[in-house]
Structures are given as structure tokens and as C-alpha cells.
Image (cartoon, rainbow, N blue to C red):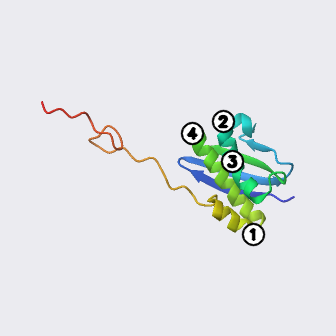
Amino acid sequence: MDKYYGTGRRKESVARVWLVPGQGEMVVNGVPLGKYFGRQTLEMLVRQPLEATGTVEKYRVVARVGGGGVSGQAGAVRHGIARALLQTDAGFGLVLRKGGFLTRDPRMKERKKYGQRGARARFQFSKR
């Protein structure tokens, strides 16, 4: 049986994604996709690579994701699906690259600096 694997990352989230031949059902951490993410926009975000390649009804997606928040996790699953799709057929590379699904989003949380309240926020200034 064919099993394709892809690792996806976004912010602090890491997703391990397996594509198994199936009817298009998606399971994230043992829960159906709609139930796990809740928001329709996040569901659409996760489905994008499959829709771009026309393989929505071809594979069953099984993902294990952890770290970060729901939005980062959705982005990580999307990245993982795209990488796994690349293993199924190298011809998808151009479509996935053009859609920006293979690019790892480099944006991360900026660190807090000493002498400040946050990454950019300063302590309140008073002349006296």
C-alpha cells in the first residue's frame, strides 16, 4: 500500500502528514478536519494544495500536529500536505510552487528584549 509523508512547519507548529489512497477524508490528531479547526477559513486553507493539484478525492489525509495556535497548525498541515503531494508526483512541483504551498513561511514571533516590556513595546516613559 502506498503511503506518502510530508513534514510541515509554520511559526511554532509542526505537522506530520501522511497521504494514503482514499476518498478524501481528512483527520487531524484523530479528529475530523472540520471539528479540529472549527473555522471554515482554516479548513479551506488546509485543502488548498489538494484542490490546486486536483487530488481532493484521491487521498485520505492523516495528520499529527502540535505546538503553536490553530492558525499556525493549519498552515503547518497545509505545508505538510504540499510536501507529501510532491512525493506522489514530481509533476505537481510547478503547480505547488506557483501557489506558494512549498515555501516555508519564515515569519516567527520576535523575542522580548531586556529593558523593555515586550519585543517592541517599551516601559512607560516619564520625565519626572
Q: Which residue is mark 3?
A: 46
Quadrant housing residue 32: top right
Q: Earlier in the sequence, mark 2 or mark 4?
A: 2
Q: Residue furthest top?
A: 128
Q: Residues under labels 3 and 2: Cα distance?
A: 11 Å
Residue sitting at x 39%, y 46%: 111
Asked whether the beta carbons under mark 2 and mark 4 sit within 8 Å of each other, the answer is no
- Amino acid at dot 4: Gly
The location of residue 2, given as percent across then percent down, is 84, 59
- Residue placed most toward the observer, 38 or 31: 38
Q: Which residue is mark 4?
A: 69
Secondary structure beneath dot 3 equals helix
Q: Which residue is mark 2?
A: 39
Q: Earlier in the sequence, mark 4 or mark 1?
A: 4
User: In the picture provided, is 94 more to the left or to the right than 3?
Assistant: left
| Callout 1 crowding tier (Cα within 10 Å): few <14, some 14–19, many ≥20 | few
Mark number, residue 91? 1
Q: Earlier in the sequence, mark 3 or mark 2?
A: 2
User: In the picture provided, is 104 more to the left or to the right than 40?
Assistant: left
- Amino acid at dot 2: Arg
Q: Residue furthest left?
A: 128
Asked whether the beta carbons under mark 2 and mark 1 sit within 8 Å of each other, the answer is no
Q: Residues under labels 4 and 1: Cα distance?
A: 32 Å
Q: Residues under labels 4 and 3: Cα distance?
A: 15 Å
The location of residue 24, given as percent across then percent down, is 82, 48
